[in-house]
Image (spheres, rainbow, N blue to C red):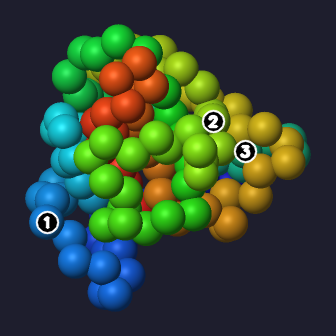
Amino acid sequence: LSTLILDPKKRPSKSFENPFSQDKEGWTKKNYAISGTITIEKANGKTILVLHQNFKTSKGPDLKLFLTKKAVAAIGKNDAVEKYGIFIGDLKSNKGAQRYELPGSVNIDDFSSLVIHCEKYTKVWGAKPI
């Protein structure tokens, strides 16, 4: 089992202006605040995205997790993330520990950001560099 703890100080590319605030865990609020630690675990040939017990955000309809190659600063508040991201899964809860197995074809190193997105209303809750 190997665990990669994502660096909360990792900043988006300086080529983008970022008008959104970033919390101490590295989440950037787009429409709603998100906080909490995430890690990536690799075990038995599988890659698992882990939201830890301290994860929390506002409740919302149709919240989904996406990985995208876009830097956090390049993601707008109302972007249709599903058009340029890889769907990871429906957000199981707006708080607490959760685990998501990434599809086998996904190489985490090919992506820049984790995004929580409300597909129903095309609203980006927030994002975090990975």
The furthest residue to the bottom: 15
Residue 46: x %, y % from top left: 80, 41
Whether residue 27 is visible to the viewer of this picture, yes or no, is: no
What's the mark number on residue 47?
3
Element assignment for label 3: strand
Q: Compared to 40, does 92 lie above or below? A: above
Q: Compared to 37, does 113 lie above or below? A: below
Side (left or right) of 69 relative to 73:
right
Which residue is under mark 1? 19
Side (left or right) of 118 relative to 60:
right
Side (left or right) of 14 relative to 116:
left
Residue drawn at (85%, 43%) of the image: 104
Residue drawn at (19%, 39%) of the image: 31
What's the mark number on residue 2?
none
Amino acid under label 2?
Phe
Element assignment for label 2: strand
Q: Marks 3 and 2, Cα distance to the nearest angstrom?
A: 14 Å
Quadrant housing residue 48: top right
Q: Which is more N-terminal, label 1 or label 3?
A: 1
Q: Marks 3 and 1, Cα distance to the nearest angstrom?
A: 32 Å
Amino acid under label 3?
Thr
Side (left or right) of 97 relative to 108:
left
Element assignment for label 1: loop
Residue 71: x %, y % from top left: 43, 67
Which residue is under mark 2? 87
Q: Compared to 88, does 107 lie above or below? A: below
Q: Which is more N-terminal, label 2 or label 3?
A: 3
Residue drawn at (32%, 34%) of the image: 123
**Classed neighbour count for the residue bearing mark 1: other residues with Cα under 10 Å, few (<14), some (14–19), many (≥20):** few
Residue 37: x %, y % from top left: 35, 45
